[in-house]
Every structure is written in structure tokens, then in C-alpha cells.
């Protein structure tokens, strides 16, 4: 009865009209509900998957020393190559390091493993800490 009371002022007193509007409303609601998707950013989920915590001194610095120093050694021979010899420099471009390693644009010779790429991602996602 309450449903009829709400619809009557809007569409009139014809019971067929009320039934059609009610069924159409339900169909519209169901279709809208089915079209909704819940989006979760991958980085939010992946940030929680970094266990154990990646250490700059244990994991990242050696990885950079072994794979990046031919070009990123700070000697100026490649002007566009950021100096990655000290933590502060590495931290300042950590997002870029994550991007270019995940896309496999760096290192140029492509020698880092998926596990090393994942370590870089985790380190950046937890804040690129000097730990």
C-alpha cells in the first residue's frame, strides 16, 4: 500500500500504469546495479604484498651498483643520465626508476630479473626508505 501511495501522485490512479512504472523502475535499478564495477588500484594492493620489507642498503643499492653504474655513475659522460651513486639521488628519481624498470626500458642491456624489478617496485611503494 505504501508503494501505491508514493506512485499515485506521480503517475495517476491507473493500476496498469503503476504496475508498468514499478516494473520499469525495478528493471532500471537492477541494470544499474549490474553495471557498477568496483575498481581497486593495483598499486594499493601490491603495496601490501611487499613482505619482507625491501631494504635500500641490502637490496636496492647493490642492484643499482651492479646494473646501472655504466651510465649512471655521476661522471657526466652521459648528461641526461641521473647520478645514482648516492641514496639522495636515487630517492629523488625513485618513481622514474620504478617506471623504467617495470617497462624494461632500463637497464639498457635488460639484465635484471623479475624478482629484482619487484624489489624496486616494493621499495618505491613503501616510500623509498633509506633503510
Image: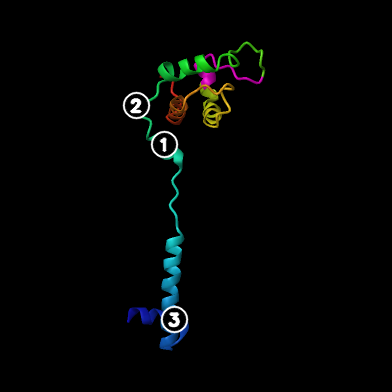
The residues colored magenta run: 80-90
Residue lying at 50% horizontally and 15% vertically, measured from the top left: 66
Q: Secondary structure at mark 1?
A: helix
What label does residue 52 carry, if any?
2
Label 3 environment density (alpha carbons within 10 Å; few <14, some 14–19, many ≥20): few
Asked whether 32 or 65 is in front, the reply is: 65
Q: Classify 116 as above or below 77.
A: below
Residue that badge 3 annotates:
20
Residue 42 is a magenta residue: no
Residue reaching furthest to the bottom: 14
Give the image's coloring scheme.
rainbow
Nearest to N terminus: mark 1 or mark 3: 3
Q: Secondary structure at mark 3?
A: helix
Q: Quadrant of residue 4?
A: bottom left
Nearest to N terminus: mark 3 or mark 2: 3
Q: Quadrant of residue 42?
A: top left
Quadrant housing the N terminus: bottom left
Residue lying at 66% horizontally and 13% vertically, measured from the top left: 77
Residue 31 lies, in percent from the top left, at: 45, 66
Are the residues flagged by discs 1 and 2 in contact, CB closer than 8 Å? no
What label does residue 46 carry, if any?
1
> Spatial distance from mark 1 to mark 2, Cα to Cα?
13 Å
Q: Secondary structure at mark 2?
A: loop
Amino acid at each position: 500500500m505504501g508503494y501505491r501511495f508514493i506512485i499515485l501522485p506521480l503517475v495517476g490512479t491507473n493500476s496498469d500504469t503503476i504496475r508498468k512504472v514499478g516494473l520499469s523502475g525495478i528493471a532500471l535499478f537492477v541494470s544499474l546495479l549490474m553495471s557498477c564495477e568496483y575498481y581497486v588500484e593495483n598499486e594499493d594492493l601490491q603495496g601490501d604484498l611487499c613482505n619482507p620489507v625491501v631494504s635500500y642498503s641490502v637490496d636496492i643499492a647493490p642492484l643499482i651498483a651492479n646494473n646501472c653504474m655504466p651510465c649512471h655513475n655521476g661522471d657526466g659522460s652521459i648528461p641526461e643520465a641521473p647520478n645514482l651513486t648516492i641514496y639522495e639521488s636515487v630517492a629523488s628519481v625513485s618513481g622514474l626508476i620504478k617506471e623504467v624498470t617495470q617497462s624494461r626500458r632500463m637497464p639498457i642491456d635488460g639484465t635484471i630479473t623479475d624478482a629484482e624489478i619487484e624489489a624496486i617496485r616494493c621499495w618505491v611503494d613503501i616510500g623509498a626508505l633509506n633503510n
